[in-house]
Amino acid sequence: MAFYICVANVHMTMEAADNPKLAAIVNNAALVTPDGVPLVWGLKLLGLKDATRVYGPELTERLCAHAAEKGIPVGFYGGAASVLEAMVAKLKLKYPSLQVPYAYSPPFRKLISEEDEDVLKTIRQSGVKILFVGLGCPKQEHWMAEHTDRLPMPLLGVGAAFDFIAGKKKSAPSWMKRIGLEWLFRLLSEPRRLWYRYLYHNPRFVILFLLQLLRGGKSGS
């Protein structure tokens, strides 16, 4: 059964707010989970008291643990080749029975149609039953939406999960995650890459969310 799942954070929320096409893609997902404490807080304020965080790396590992237990083959699409190699090695060390018949690091450029068809053919022939997509937002959401009808398995867009599981990026301390300051840890870790994302999107998210609350919790779309 083919469908895709989005693991959303403030960055994805604001990218979707700015881009109607991306908003439609996220809204058409089979499931959108809150990856980020600010979104969990927002959902609770909107009345979803049982909302909890679905952290991308943790979701990936839990599903891989379940897949290993049940004999379900999984695949990975995205990330640098060194990241994929390190991540798969760590997952197999942790879950020895995990089957990973497919792991591919695509080029940063857009694939031409022939290359894309070859990728899809290889994925289908691999026997993968769950495909994790780690291309980063919004690239992975567009990729999943464009390919979900041509692949016979669920697609999960897990952002930077590959890097965290591989150990290429450090995870924020638990106390920073609990109080919603993971973004600050990541900003200090990668200021040149992430300054625009956090310093531009985060204040706007707060303002737009407060406006939504004032409207009684209804979306403006």
Image (spheres, rainbow, N blue to C red):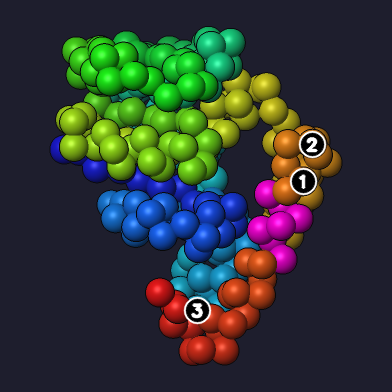
Report how far apart the C-alphas of labels 2 and 1 lie in the structure. 6 Å
Residue on which disc 2 sits: 192
The answer to whether 162 is drawn above or below residue 16 in the figure is above
Q: Residues within 10 Å of mark 2 (few under 14, many from 20)?
A: few
The answer to whether 98 is drawn above or below residue 64 in the figure is above
Asked if residue 68 lies in the magenta stretch, the reply is: no
In-front residue for pair 1/113: 113
Circles 2, 1 touching at the beta carbon (< 8 Å): yes
- Tag 2, which secondary structure? helix
Q: Residue at x 46, y 37 (%)?
A: 139
Q: Which percent across, then down, holds residue 35?
A: 54, 51
Q: Which percent across, then down, holds residue 157?
A: 42, 38
Q: Mark 1 or mark 3: name the one nearer the start of the chain.
A: 3
- Tag 3, which secondary structure? loop
Total numbered circles: 3
Report how far apart the C-alphas of labels 1 and 3 lie in the structure. 29 Å
- Tag 1, which secondary structure? helix
Q: Residues within 10 Å of mark 3 (few under 14, many from 20)?
A: some
Residue range highlighted in magenta: 197-203
Locate the N terminus and report the quarter of the image it occupies. Answer: top left
Residue 31 can be seen, yes or no:
no
Locate the C terminus and report the quarter of the image it occupies. Answer: bottom left
Circles 1, 3 touching at the beta carbon (< 8 Å): no
Asked if residue 199 lies in the magenta stretch, the reply is: yes
Circles 2, 3 touching at the beta carbon (< 8 Å): no
In this rendering, which labeled residue sits more in front, label 1 or label 3?
Answer: 1
Q: Main secondary structure of the magenta part?
A: helix
Q: Residue at x 26, y 14 (%)?
A: 114
Residue 138 can be seen, yes or no:
yes
Residue on which disc 1 sits: 195
Residue on which disc 3 sits: 46
Report how far apart the C-alphas of labels 2 and 3 lie in the structure. 34 Å
